[in-house]
Image: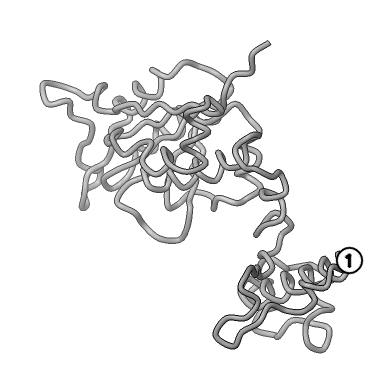
């Protein structure tokens, strides 16, 4: 039995933005080999009137324009019904996490809606069960770049895309921590040397060094990832995080 490729359908006003960078490097090679499939559909095909209008002024007044629910609903309905989740790239969505990316990569694919203008009519979000997803606490001109980010994160985890399975496991966020430091040749560069422990061949000691440094970097840069982590708490000075960090995590 032939396994269907991981399938992404993107609904956008700018289909020419795809595959973009996803057509290069590992994701591009995987696309050419049929490990995953991508189709970018023009929302404006379902626009209204001679000019294929897709937006209108916001109810209640205000700046900007809003994508119409009837137009976007028709665009979503044009995609064959299947089990893929329907995602809307939105700054007000739940933050995209590595756990969510891995779950998506293990499914059949995704239908991704790229918003534009001031936003999307709330009724189509409710009526079509769109899951709002954010890639960070900032606003972009549209959902296309965010969709590229999400797709890249998913595609790289598909079987056969990366050379080594461990490449997708031993990295930031997979274990709830940031990744440990990496080094390669030359052994010395601008008076900076590779830590001796990494060159000694003691794999247990190397694993311990990597674990401790991953914990150190996470504590310094993203203490929010370590909330409730007993090992991380013991690692901190005095057996606990500084008070300002605890206040942030407990907020």
Identify whether 174 is placed above or below 112: below
> Residue at 65% across / 70% down in the picture?
183
Point out the residue furthest to the left here.
50
Measured as percent of width and height from the top left, residue 188 is found at 62, 81
User: Callout 1 environment at 10 Å: few (<14), some (14 to 19), or many (20+)?
Assistant: few
- Label 1 sits on residue: 204
> Residue at 18% across / 29% down in the picture?
53
Residue 121 horizontal side relative to residue 247, left or right: left
- Along the line of sight, the residue nearer the viewer: 221 or 186: 186
Identify whether 86 is placed above or below 98: above
Residue 219 horizontal side relative to residue 33, left or right: right
Measured as percent of width and height from the top left, residue 69 is found at 33, 30
- Along the line of sight, the residue nearer the viewer: 87 or 222: 222
Measured as percent of width and height from the top left, residue 145 is found at 38, 47
Q: Could you tell me which secondary element the residue under label 1 belongs to?
A: helix
Q: How is the image coloured?
A: one colour
- Along the line of sight, the residue nearer the viewer: 162 or 101: 162
Task: Tell me which corner region of the image, top left, top right, bottom left or bottom right, holds residue 51.
Answer: top left
Measured as percent of width and height from the top left, residue 142 is found at 32, 47
- Along the line of sight, the residue nearer the viewer: 158 or 112: 158
Residue 36 horizontal side relative to residue 227, left or right: left
> Residue at 65% across / 68% down in the picture?
182
Q: Is residue 247 visible?
A: no
Picture quarter with the C terminus: bottom right
Q: Is residue 133 visible?
A: yes
Identify whether 195 is placed above or below 133: below
Task: Tell me which corner region of the image, top left, top right, bottom left or bottom right, holds residue 83.
Answer: top right
Count the marks.
1
Picture quarter with the N terminus: top right
């Amino acid at each position: 039995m032939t396994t269907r490729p991981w399938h992404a359908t993107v609904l956008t006003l700018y289909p020419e933005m795809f595959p973009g960078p996803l057509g290069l490097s590992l994701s591009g090679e995987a696309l050419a080999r049929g490990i995953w499939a991508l189709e970018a559909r023009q929302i404006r095909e379902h626009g209204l009137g001679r000019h294929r209008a897709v937006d209108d002024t916001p109810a209640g007044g205000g700046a900007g324009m809003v994508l119409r629910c009837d137009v976007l609903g028709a665009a979503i309905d044009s995609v064959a019904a299947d089990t893929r989740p329907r995602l809307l790239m939105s700054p007000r969505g739940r933050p995209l996490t590595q756990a969510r990316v891995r779950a998506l990569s293990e499914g059949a694919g995704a239908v991704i809606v790229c918003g534009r203008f001031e936003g999307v009519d709330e009724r189509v979000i409710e009526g079509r069960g769109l899951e709002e997803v954010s890639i960070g606490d900032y606003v972009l001109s549209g959902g296309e770049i965010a969709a590229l980010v999400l797709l890249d994160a998913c595609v790289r985890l598909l079987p056969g895309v990366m050379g080594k399975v461990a490449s997708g496991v031993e990295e930031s966020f997979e274990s709830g921590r940031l990744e440990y430091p990496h080094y390669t040749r030359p052994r010395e560069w601008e008076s900076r040397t590779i830590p001796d422990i990494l060159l000694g061949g003691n794999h247990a000691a190397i694993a311990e060094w990597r674990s401790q440094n991953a914990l150190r970097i996470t504590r310094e840069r993203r203490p929010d990832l370590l909330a409730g982590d007993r090992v991380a708490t013991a690692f901190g000075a005095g057996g606990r995080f500084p008070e300002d960090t605890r206040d942030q995590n407990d907020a």
